[in-house]
Amino acid sequence: MVWYQYKNEPPKNGLPHRLRTEDGSTRTCLCECSEEELTSMGFVVVSDPPNYNSNTQEIVYDNETSTWSVEDTTDVVKVEDAWEQNDMFRDKLKINLLNSALKYSRSGGIISTHFDGAISILDNVTRDNYSTPFEFDWRYPSSVGYTNEVVAGITSTEHRMINSAFVDFIDETYIPNQKY
C-alpha cells in the first residue's frame, strides 16, 4: 500500500475513507481519485518508512527533508520494560560468570584479580551510567563493555570463562531476531 501525507500531517499508510474538504463538503472513495486530484486536495505520496523494532524504536517523518528516521522510543512503559530486561540480563550474565569462576576454582584453578574487573563491567550497566537502555545487544560482549582493552589483564582461561558465560547466557535467553 502507498503512504500518503496530507497537508504536513504525519504520513499514513493508504488513503482515508473520507475527507472533509476546505469548503466543508465530504469526499469519499479517494482511492478512485487520480494523482492530480489527490495532489490538489493536499495529498503527497511519501516513501515507505524504514524497518524498525516497534518494541524499542519509533519512526519519525521529517516534513522539511521528506525523510524518515528511526529513533529510540520515548514511550515511558517501553523504556522502563527495557531497563528491567537489561537488569535481568545483567544479573543472569553475572551469575553465569560467577558460576564459571566457582567451577574453575573448585577444580584447582586460581582466579586473577582482573576477573573482578570483568564482573564489575556488568555492575556499570545501569541507568546511572547510560542514557538509554537500547544501546545494548546482549549477544555481543563488546556491547556491554567487554572490549579488548578492558579484558587485557585477564588470563586466557578467564577469557574462555567469560566467552562461555556469554554463550550459556545466549543459549538460555536469546530470542532470534530480537534486539534487547
Image (cartoon, grey):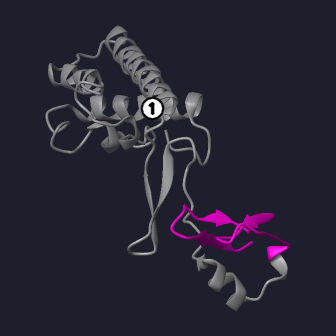
Residue 126 rendering spot, x and y as whole percentages: 30, 24
Q: Quadrant of residue 22?
A: bottom right
Residue located 37% across and 21% down the image: 97
- Up the image or down, 76 lies above or below 105; here it is below
Residue furthest top as drawn: 106
Q: Quadrant of the N terminus?
A: bottom right
Residue located 63% across and 84% down the image: 39
Q: Quadrant of residue 107?
A: top left
- Front-most of residues 123 and 168: 123
Q: Is residue 25 magenta?
A: yes
Amino acid type at mark 1? Val
1 left or right, relative to 95: right
Residue linked to disc 1: 79
Would you call the spot at circle 1 few (<14 residues within 10 Å), some (14-19), or many (20 or more)?
Answer: some
Q: Is residue 107 magenta?
A: no
Residue 21 rendering spot, x and y as whole percentages: 69, 70
Could you say whether the residue bearing mark 1 is in a helix, strand or loop? helix
Residue furthest front as drawn: 23
Residue 31 rendering spot, x and y as whole percentages: 82, 77
- Up the image or down, 146 lies above or below 114; here it is below
- Front-most of residues 38 and 68: 38
159 left or right, relative to 29: left
Residue 146 rendering spot, x and y as whole percentages: 27, 38
Q: Quadrant of residue 156?
A: top left
Q: Which residues are magenta?
A: 1-30
- Front-most of residues 1 and 83: 1
26 left or right, relative to 164: right
